[in-house]
Structures are given as structure tokens and as C-alpha cells.
Image: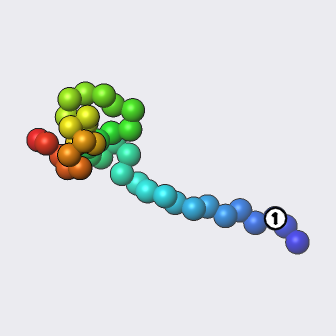
Amino acid sequence: MAPTIQVVLLGVAQDAGLPQAGCDCANCVTARAVGRNPC
């Protein structure tokens, strides 16, 4: 029997809102602290 490949999709929101992963701009930092988009 051939091995099977299984993929788990965790999300599709990268670069589509705030906060962005790895960004330390004021908007992203505030969004992480407050829990919503400050704009």
C-alpha cells in the first residue's frame, strides 16, 4: 500500500489584517494588547 499524505490547514489569514505575524509597528502592537484593530 502506498503511503498517504495528510494535510491540516490551520488558517488562511496571513497578511490579511492586524496584527501581522512578526510586525512590531504601533498598530500591530496595539491590536495584540487590546484584542482588536485600532484603525
Question: Viewed as shown, does residue 6 lie left or right of 36?
Answer: right
Q: Where is residue 22 drawn, in percent x and y? A: 39, 32
Which quarter of the picture shows residue 21? Answer: top left
Work out which quarter of the rendered image holds the C terminus and state it: top left
Q: Is the image coloured rainbow, by chain, by secondary structure, or in one colour?
A: rainbow
Question: Viewed as shown, does residue 11 lie left or right of 38?
Answer: right
- Residue position marked by numbered label 1 in the rendering: 3
Which quarter of the picture shows residue 32? Answer: top left
Q: For the view shown, which residue lies furthest in the bottom direction?
A: 1
User: Closer to the camera, 34 or 37?
Assistant: 34
Question: Viewed as shown, does residue 6 lie left or right of 16?
Answer: right
Q: Where is residue 7 drawn, in percent x and y? A: 61, 61
Mark 1 is surrounded, within 10 Å at the Cα level, by few (under 14), some (14 to 19) or many (20 or more) other residues, namely few
Q: For the view shown, which residue lies furthest in the top direction?
A: 25
At horizontal 23% and vertical 49% (from top left) the residue drawn is 35
User: Closer to the camera, 7 or 38?
Assistant: 38
Q: Where is residue 5 drawn, in percent x and y? A: 71, 62
Q: Where is residue 26 drawn, in percent x and y? A: 20, 29
Position of 30 relative to 8 (above/below): above
Question: Viewed as shown, does residue 8 lie left or right of 25?
Answer: right
The local secondary structure at tag 1 comes to loop
At horizontal 25% and vertical 36% (from top left) the residue drawn is 28
At horizontal 25% and vertical 27% (from top left) the residue drawn is 25
Q: For the view shown, which residue lies furthest in the left direction?
A: 39
Position of 35 relative to 9 (above/below): above
Q: How many labels does the image show?
A: 1
Which quarter of the picture shows residue 23? Answer: top left
User: Closer to the camera, 1 or 39?
Assistant: 39
Which amino acid type corresponds to the residue marked 1 in the rendered image? Pro
At horizontal 41% and vertical 54% (from top left) the residue drawn is 12
Q: For the view shown, which residue lies furthest in the front direction?
A: 33
Work out which quarter of the rendered image holds the N terminus and state it: bottom right
